Amino acid sequence: MSLYWWTIEVIDGPHSSASRWRDAHQETVVSAAVSFGAREWHWQTFGWGVLFEVAFDSEETWPEFRALPAVRAALDAVPDPVNGLLIYPGRGGSAGRVQPRRPRPTAGAGAVPLPREEPPSRVTLATAEPAPTAAGVTV
Protein backbone atom coordinates (compact mmCIF):
# COMPACT_ATOMS: atom_id res chain seq x y z
CA MET A 1 0.00 0.00 0.00
CA SER A 2 1.43 3.34 -1.05
CA LEU A 3 0.89 6.39 1.12
CA TYR A 4 1.05 9.98 -0.07
CA TRP A 5 2.82 12.11 2.55
CA TRP A 6 2.49 15.87 2.98
CA THR A 7 4.37 18.11 5.38
CA ILE A 8 3.31 21.35 7.04
CA GLU A 9 6.16 23.31 8.66
CA VAL A 10 5.29 26.13 11.02
CA ILE A 11 8.21 28.37 11.95
CA ASP A 12 8.42 30.48 15.11
CA GLY A 13 7.32 34.09 14.71
CA PRO A 14 8.60 37.29 16.26
CA HIS A 15 5.86 37.42 18.92
CA SER A 16 4.71 33.82 19.31
CA SER A 17 6.14 30.32 19.04
CA ALA A 18 5.08 27.53 16.74
CA SER A 19 4.64 25.27 19.77
CA ARG A 20 1.88 27.55 21.04
CA TRP A 21 0.27 27.40 17.58
CA ARG A 22 0.42 23.61 17.76
CA ASP A 23 -1.20 23.59 21.21
CA ALA A 24 -4.04 25.78 19.93
CA HIS A 25 -4.70 24.01 16.57
CA GLN A 26 -3.48 20.45 16.97
CA GLU A 27 -6.87 18.93 17.76
CA THR A 28 -8.57 20.69 14.85
CA VAL A 29 -5.94 19.73 12.27
CA VAL A 30 -5.67 16.10 13.37
CA SER A 31 -9.46 15.68 13.55
CA ALA A 32 -9.83 17.05 10.03
CA ALA A 33 -7.07 14.76 8.76
CA VAL A 34 -8.62 11.67 10.36
CA SER A 35 -12.08 12.54 9.01
CA PHE A 36 -10.56 12.72 5.50
CA GLY A 37 -8.91 9.31 5.83
CA ALA A 38 -5.42 10.04 7.07
CA ARG A 39 -3.56 6.77 7.66
CA GLU A 40 -0.65 8.21 9.63
CA TRP A 41 0.33 11.54 11.11
CA HIS A 42 3.22 12.78 13.20
CA TRP A 43 4.07 15.98 15.05
CA GLN A 44 7.72 16.89 15.53
CA THR A 45 9.09 19.78 17.54
CA PHE A 46 12.36 21.50 16.66
CA GLY A 47 14.19 24.54 17.97
CA TRP A 48 12.89 26.61 15.05
CA GLY A 49 9.25 25.42 14.98
CA VAL A 50 7.00 22.40 14.51
CA LEU A 51 6.35 19.89 11.76
CA PHE A 52 3.09 18.09 10.96
CA GLU A 53 3.43 15.13 8.61
CA VAL A 54 0.29 13.44 7.35
CA ALA A 55 -0.25 10.49 4.97
CA PHE A 56 -3.32 9.81 2.82
CA ASP A 57 -4.23 6.86 0.58
CA SER A 58 -4.59 8.99 -2.55
CA GLU A 59 -3.20 12.21 -3.97
CA GLU A 60 -6.69 13.66 -4.46
CA THR A 61 -7.40 13.70 -0.71
CA TRP A 62 -4.81 16.37 0.10
CA PRO A 63 -6.42 19.31 -1.79
CA GLU A 64 -9.78 18.48 -0.21
CA PHE A 65 -8.22 18.37 3.27
CA ARG A 66 -6.28 21.60 2.62
CA ALA A 67 -9.44 23.41 1.47
CA LEU A 68 -11.39 22.71 4.67
CA PRO A 69 -12.32 25.96 6.46
CA ALA A 70 -10.95 24.69 9.80
CA VAL A 71 -7.59 23.79 8.24
CA ARG A 72 -7.41 27.08 6.33
CA ALA A 73 -8.16 29.01 9.53
CA ALA A 74 -5.45 27.12 11.42
CA LEU A 75 -2.88 27.78 8.68
CA ASP A 76 -3.86 31.44 8.51
CA ALA A 77 -3.11 31.74 12.24
CA VAL A 78 0.59 30.75 12.09
CA PRO A 79 2.93 32.95 14.19
CA ASP A 80 4.76 34.39 11.15
CA PRO A 81 2.24 34.78 8.30
CA VAL A 82 4.84 35.95 5.75
CA ASN A 83 7.71 33.47 6.11
CA GLY A 84 6.51 31.05 8.76
CA LEU A 85 4.55 28.45 6.78
CA LEU A 86 5.94 25.83 4.39
CA ILE A 87 3.75 23.14 2.80
CA TYR A 88 5.19 20.52 0.48
CA PRO A 89 4.68 16.90 -0.60
CA GLY A 90 6.67 14.18 1.11
CA ARG A 91 8.20 13.92 4.52
CA GLY A 92 10.72 16.49 5.58
CA GLY A 93 12.19 18.78 8.14
CA SER A 94 14.99 16.61 9.45
CA ALA A 95 16.28 15.09 6.23
CA GLY A 96 19.37 17.31 6.17
CA ARG A 97 20.96 19.18 3.30
CA VAL A 98 20.94 17.77 -0.21
CA GLN A 99 24.25 19.45 -1.12
CA PRO A 100 27.26 19.83 1.17
CA ARG A 101 27.91 23.17 2.80
CA ARG A 102 30.47 25.51 1.26
CA PRO A 103 33.68 25.92 3.25
CA ARG A 104 33.91 29.04 5.36
CA PRO A 105 36.92 31.39 5.19
CA THR A 106 39.75 30.63 7.57
CA ALA A 107 39.70 32.79 10.67
CA GLY A 108 42.63 33.84 12.82
CA ALA A 109 46.24 33.38 11.71
CA GLY A 110 45.28 31.73 8.43
CA ALA A 111 43.20 34.65 7.25
CA VAL A 112 44.36 36.86 4.41
CA PRO A 113 45.46 40.34 5.52
CA LEU A 114 43.30 43.27 4.52
CA PRO A 115 44.62 45.38 1.66
CA ARG A 116 45.98 48.74 2.79
CA GLU A 117 46.02 51.95 0.82
CA GLU A 118 49.43 53.53 0.27
CA PRO A 119 49.81 57.04 1.68
CA PRO A 120 49.90 59.80 -0.94
CA SER A 121 53.46 60.51 -2.10
CA ARG A 122 52.88 64.15 -3.08
CA VAL A 123 52.65 66.72 -0.31
CA THR A 124 51.38 70.26 -0.88
CA LEU A 125 52.41 72.91 1.62
CA ALA A 126 50.04 75.76 2.40
CA THR A 127 51.19 79.36 2.17
CA ALA A 128 50.87 81.47 5.27
CA GLU A 129 50.62 85.22 5.58
CA PRO A 130 51.70 87.11 8.69
CA ALA A 131 48.97 88.16 11.07
CA PRO A 132 48.00 91.86 10.99
CA THR A 133 49.10 94.13 13.81
CA ALA A 134 46.72 95.81 16.28
CA ALA A 135 46.55 98.81 13.98
CA GLY A 136 45.60 96.62 11.00
CA VAL A 137 49.01 96.84 9.29
CA THR A 138 50.42 93.74 7.69
CA VAL A 139 54.14 93.35 7.50
Image (spheres, rainbow, N blue to C red):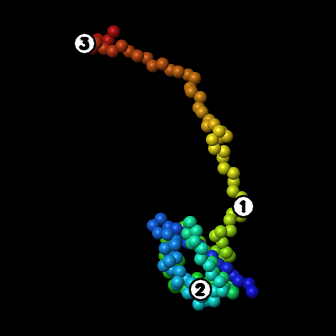
Residue occupied by mark 1? 99
Quarter of the figure with residue 46: bottom right
Give neighbour class at mark 3: few <14, some 14-19, many 20+ (Cα, 10 Å): few
Which comes before the other along the chain, label 1 or label 2? 2
Q: Is residue 76 visible?
A: no
Q: Residue at x 48, y 79 (%)?
A: 24
Q: Residue at x 56, y 27 (%)?
A: 119
Q: CA distance from mark 1 to mark 2?
A: 33 Å
Q: Which mark is residue 33?
A: 2
The kind of residue tagged 1 is Gln
Whole-percent x and y of residue 96? 68, 65
Give neighbour class at mark 2: few <14, some 14-19, many 20+ (Cα, 10 Å): many
- SS at mark 1 in the image: loop
Q: CA distance from mark 3 to mark 1?
A: 84 Å
Q: Residue at x 48, y 19 (%)?
A: 125
Quadrant assignment for the N terminus: bottom right
Give neighbour class at mark 1: few <14, some 14-19, many 20+ (Cα, 10 Å): few
- SS at mark 3 in the image: loop
- SS at mark 2 in the image: helix
Whole-percent x and y of residue 48? 56, 66
Whole-percent x and y of residue 53? 63, 78
Asked if marks 2 and 3 touch (Cβ < 8 Å), the reply is: no
Residue 94's place in the image compared with 108, above or below, is below
Residues 16 and 46: in front is 46
The kind of residue tagged 2 is Ala
Q: Which mark is residue 56?
A: none
Q: Is residue 131 visible?
A: yes
Residue occupied by mark 3? 135
